């Protein structure tokens, strides 16, 4: 009897589920909101320290590269090779930084594009006022975290396919 009631319950759930359980894709953002989001992101970007962001990202991607090295090539223990690989990845991240900067900005601006154009205009107006300066500082702080994560994601995706080649380049001086 118990099994029969469980089967009945399962059948009820199966028929109660909507036919299209996958939600529809989100609507395209309002073009005015995209423009305002880009403006807000640009204004907050001015307050960020570009070299600090680039340096943090370079170190973060290099540390992740060392984790990749330990996972994929656990036989590479030579500290000189590991240090050379670490530095080579940092140099590569720094080399592609300018190329990827617009992708980083777009990734961060996407967070603001979830707001309406009216709200974005209001936020921009408020942070420009004397009363909104504290809020601006808090927003820049949270924007800094968004920028850190966005920069890491963009540059890691860009440099990750190059890890094997960078490792080969790091191993050549050690072999000589």
Image: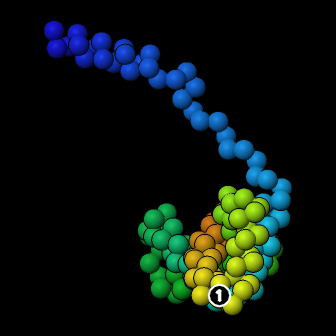
**Residue beneath label 1, please?**
131
Residue at point 45%, 65% (across, down): 71
Q: Is residue 100 visible?
A: no
Closest to the observer, 89 or 170: 89
Q: Check the picture and name the quadrant holding the N terminus.
A: top left
Q: Is residue 160 left or right of residue 16?
A: right
9 vs 92: above or below: above
Q: Quadrant of the C terminus?
A: bottom right
Q: Secondary structure at mark 1?
A: helix
Toward the viewer: 171 or 111? 111
Q: Position of residue 118 (x, y in %)?
A: 75, 63
Which residue is at 58% across, 26% downward? 20
Q: How many marks?
A: 1
Residue 147 percent location from the top left of the image: 64, 75
Q: Evaluate whether residue 74 shows in this view.
A: yes
Quarter where residue 93 is shown:
bottom right
Q: Is residue 111 positioned above or below 151 on the image?
A: above
Task: Indicate how the structure is coloured in the image.
Answer: rainbow
Residue 24 drawn above or below residue 132: above
């Amino acid at each position: 009897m118990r099994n029969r009631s469980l089967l009945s319950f399962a059948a009820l759930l199966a028929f109660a589920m909507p036919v299209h359980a996958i939600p529809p894709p989100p609507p395209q953002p309002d073009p005015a909101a995209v423009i305002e989001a880009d403006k807000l992101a640009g204004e907050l970007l001015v307050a960020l320290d570009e070299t600090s962001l680039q340096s943090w990202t370079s170190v973060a991607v290099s540390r992740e590269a060392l984790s990749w090295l330990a996972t994929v090539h656990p036989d590479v223990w030579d500290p000189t090779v590991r240090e050379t690989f670490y530095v080579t990845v940092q140099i590569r991240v720094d080399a592609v930084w300018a190329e990827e900067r617009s992708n980083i900005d777009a990734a961060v601006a996407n967070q603001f594009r979830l707001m309406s154009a009216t709200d974005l205009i209001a936020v921009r107006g408020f942070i420009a006022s004397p009363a909104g300066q504290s809020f601006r500082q808090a927003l820049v702080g949270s924007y800094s975290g968004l920028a850190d994560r966005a920069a890491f994601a963009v540059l890691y995706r860009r440099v990750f396919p190059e890890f094997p080649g960078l490792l080969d380049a790091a191993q050549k001086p050690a072999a000589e």
